Amino acid sequence: MIELQQFLKIVLNISGGEAKHLVQEGLVYVNGAVETRRSRKLSLDDVVEVRLEELSGEKYKVSDFIKG
């Protein structure tokens, strides 16, 4: 398993501070629900979405990036 903040850093190629900001601002969704816990453990079946204009609703399946 991987924590949400670490996953965002890997997938979006951003710093920890930037990942923290995205989560705190309510811009990160896990399986369709807003997630505000940076330390949330993600499972391979989870789908993470970052709702920023630049990303236009891109969704990232954890298993596409992390091998169990």
Image (cartoon, rainbow, N blue to C red):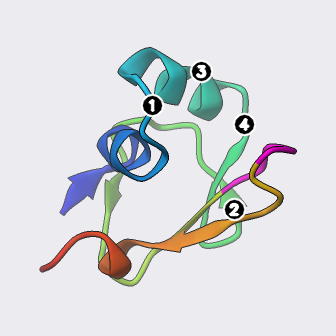
**Is 17 placed left or right of 66 in the picture?**
right
**Residue 6 has which mark?**
none
Q: Is residue 17 magenta?
A: no
- Residue 26 disc label: 4
Q: Provide residue 64's location: percent of width, then percent of height.
A: 35, 79
Is mark 3 in CB contact (under 8 Å) with mark 4?
Answer: no
Circle 2 or circle 1, nearest the eye: 1
Query: What residue type is disc 1 on?
Result: Ile
Whichever of labels 3 and 2 marks the residue nearer the N terminus, that label is: 3
- Counting other residues with Cα less than 10 Å from the Cα at mark 2, is it few (<14), some (14-19), or many (20 or more)? few
**How many other residues sit within 10 Å of disc 4, few (<14), some (14-19) or many (≥20)?**
some
Q: Tell me which amino acid carries mark 3.
A: His
For discs 3 and 2, the disc positioned in front in the rendered view: 3
Q: Which residues are magenta?
A: 50-54
Alpha carbon separation for disc pair 1 and 3: 11 Å
Which kind of residue does numbered mark 4 sit on?
A: Gly
Q: Give me the C-alpha separation between circle 2 and circle 1.
A: 22 Å
> Residue 24: horizontal and vertical position, in percent?
62, 25
Neighbourhood count class around disc 3 (C-alpha, 10 Å): few under 14, some 14–19, many 20 upward: some
Q: Residue at x 45, y 15 (%)?
A: 17
- The residue at which mark 2 appears reads as 33
Q: Which mark is residue 14?
A: 1
Q: Does residue 51 show up magenta in the picture?
A: yes
Task: Tell me which label, 4 or 2, sits earlier in the chain.
Answer: 4
The residue mark sitting in front, 1 or 3, is 1
Name the secondary structure under disc 2. strand
Mark 3, residue position: 21
